[in-house]
Image (tube, rainbow, N blue to C red):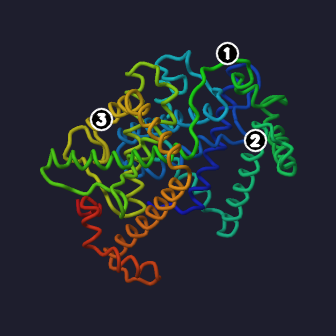
Amino acid sequence: MNYTFYELAMLFFAYSFLAWLVETVVATVKEKNFRNRGFLSGPFCFLYGFTGVILTVFLQELRQDAFFLFAGSMAVATAVQWFAGKTLERIKRKKWWDYSGKTGNFDGYICLQYSLLWGVLGFLAVRYGNGILLGIYDLLPGIAGKAVVWGLIAVGFVDFAGTLLAVWHAEEKLPRLLFWNHRLQRVTYRLTARVAGYVDRRIGRSYPCVLQDQAEEKRTESFGFVQVFWMFVIGALAGDIVETLFCRITSGVWMSRSSLVWGPFSVVWGLAIALATMLLYKDRDRQDRHIFWVGFFLGGAYEYICSVFTEIVFGKVFWDYSAMPFNLGGRINLLYCFFWGIAAVVWIKGLYPKVSRLIASILRGTGQIPTMLLMLFMAFNILISMLALVRYDTRAAGKTPIHKWEQSMDEYFDDERMERIYPNGKAKGDL
């Protein structure tokens, strides 16, 4: 099933509100006092809304398979929760939640108890919840439904932007935005007054570890955009070379493994290396098994999402593990998840310190101009590659070129050339 922008937006806000309501009620009952569990000023927990949309889009094909829908929801939602926690910690160097006291926790951000709960919630949402919520939304007339969505987007923007300004102590920069944010906060307090009384300092009460004094953290290396970009480029180049050699050794053929039309670059590997570095480098002194299991689970979830994304956007399946044991929809398999874990350890423990020095040497020796030129080239390369892949798919469907860009893609990137660049790119029905 293909969802429209308005349907996905409605699901996002519906799950954000329902999650806020459930978390607030549960915390209030448990602590015998009102606890507003939202991070923002409004009645929303956007992490849940975002997760609900991710599961809706990427796990739709598992809707009729109860076990794999549960397992996939548990894995993807846990990965999103861990990623969100680590990202917030990188921004403010504080933990917004901490499960260190719970059994089976990992890094304090995820634990077995909540991972299982994520699996159940994801199963219920994809199997039943989406249909119920969209059925209610469909009762609204077309114009009214769209107006509701745009109204919620406006409220969400004021909520999110105003809260960020408060967190960063930059309220004076946009006072008008803060005015509407505070109005929204008062509306939220009136809404929750039926559960309990007014709560002062909302975020501090919900997440006390944010405002409490903590021991000085070990200084960690900061990553600017330029460094992350170079990690992406080096990871994309190395990933393409490794996969090309792997295909040669295992299949006996030289095969293009590039994601882009110009140059040996694997975008999947480039993004993986950049994300792994930002999320895991702080934990470089922890035991190898810690980094291995993070790479194992997050690498598998990442590869699954990449597979679904490329199929939805470009209409092609670029890898298929259906013939391998312990695979999930042909998109991931147990063996390659182990490879992801090993790659994480090798990168963080062994390769990154050397690559970091190489990047620093490049920047010192060449300055910023070559980097800017490379950025422009990669951005243009990615754009043209996306257009070529989209046209490759529509051309296979028998659609004639209408726009100028479609004619250009047909001229410069015909089927023969695209098959050389993407020899494994197959339509779902051709597998």
- Specify the quadrant of the image occupied by residue 221: top right
**Residue, disc 3:** 339
- Nearer to the camera, 247 or 96: 247
* Disc on the earlier residue, 3 or 2: 2
x then y, percent, for residue 272: 42, 43
Answer with left or right where residue 240 lies relative to residue 21.
Answer: left
User: Which tag is nearer the camera, tag 1 or tag 3?
Assistant: 1
Whether tag 3 and tag 2 are in contact, CB under 8 A, the answer is: no
**Residue, disc 2:** 163
Q: Is residue 291 above or below residue 159?
A: above
The residue located at (37%, 21%) in the rendering is 289
* Disc on the earlier residue, 1 or 3: 1
The residue located at (40%, 52%) in the rendering is 267
Q: Identity of the amino acid at label 2?
A: Thr
x then y, percent, for residue 76: 45, 40
Q: Is residue 123 visible?
A: no
Mark 3, residues whose alpha carbon is within 10 Å: few (<14), some, or many (≥20)?
some
* Disc on the earlier residue, 1 or 2: 2
Whether tag 1 and tag 2 are in contact, CB under 8 A, the answer is: no
- Specify the quadrant of the image occupied by residue 198: top right
Answer with left or right where residue 372 lies relative to residue 427.
Answer: right
User: Which tag is nearer the camera, tag 3 or tag 2?
Assistant: 3
Q: Which mark is residue 215?
A: 1
x then y, percent, for residue 33: 76, 22
Q: Identity of the amino acid at label 3?
A: Phe
Answer with left or right where residue 4 lies relative to residue 186.
Answer: left
